[in-house]
Image (cartoon, rainbow, N blue to C red):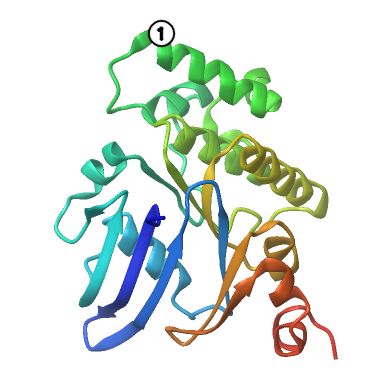
Amino acid sequence: MTALLDVKDLKVAYGKIEAVKGISFTVDAGQVVTLIGTNGAGKTTTLRTISGLLRPLAGSISFAGVPLGSIPAHEIVALGLAHSPEGRRVFPRLTVEENLRLGAFLREDVDGIDRDVARAYALFPVLEERRAQAAGTLSGGEQQMLAMGRALMSRPKLLMLDEPSMGLSPIMMQKIMATIVELKALGTTILLVEQNARAALSLADRGYVMETGRIVLSGSGAELLHDESVRKAYLGED
């Protein structure tokens, strides 16, 4: 079976500094795949390159069989790949509903967009309560829900989530992770970057450990959860 996302020998640099040093991994349809590692490992850079915000120095990325090398970011979205970025990046002066509808900026099916707004509200009921509220006045957790809901508005084949639990309270983090489990049950394919390695590996079908721009370990989520080196380095166990 051909992978939905296939990354081969990817290298990415900022000037003379090579941030990603020849990594390869795949994401199959219906899977949750996670990249874990410390700050500076190259995880966010990898997602930004897949979504077309950065250009690779070398290597290849293909999505649903289409090479992404020179395709601009908005066309990558149109192919079915959505990115919920680190730091949420909501439009603070626009309302919750306006933010959601911006996620469907490439679509023209008005009825379908309305249905997907309703679906986002069903997934995140607090957003419906605040639908006319400026997004910048939401809590961090609510903004994360909005960022995820906005990304889903493009009806992606693959949803990339970058640090969805960053800066959130334990209760809100649990809500976000429960939503990812729910999306997985609905058949959504997810590529997850997450500092909370235990939470990420607990729900992932497959995981990759990144260190200084390289993948140093891979396996199923369960295998990595029980790997001694992962437990010591990322799960805080001796």
Q: Residue at image x 56%, y 35%?
A: 146
Near-viewer residue (29 or 165): 29
Please say whether residue 94 is visible from this viewpoint: no
- Residue that extends furthest to the left in the rendered view of this protein: 70
- Residue picked out by circle 1: 111
**Can you give x and y, in whole percent of width and height, for residue 195 in the image?**
64, 68
Q: Residue at image x 49%, y 24%?
A: 95
Counting every numbered tag in the picture gives 1
Classify 178 as above or below 233. Answer: above
Near-viewer residue (33 or 52): 33
* Res 68 → quadrant: bottom left
Q: State the SS at label 1.
A: helix
* Res 132 → quadrant: top right
Is 217 situated left or right of 17 in this image? right
Please say whether residue 18 is visible from this viewpoint: yes
Q: Residue at image x 43%, y 70%?
A: 25
Crowdedness near tag 1: few (<14), some (14–19) or many (≥20) residues, C-alpha within 10 Å: few
For the C terminus, the image quarter is bottom right
- Residue that extends furthest to the front in the rendered view of this protein: 1
- Residue that extends furthest to the top in the rendered view of this protein: 111
**Can you give x and y, in whole percent of width and height, for residue 111 in the image?**
40, 8
* Res 229 → quadrant: bottom right
**Can you give x and y, in whole percent of width and height, for residue 35 in the image?**
54, 69
Classify 226 as above or below 190. Answer: below
Q: Amino acid at mark 1?
A: Asp
Q: Residue at image x 64%, y 46%?
A: 140
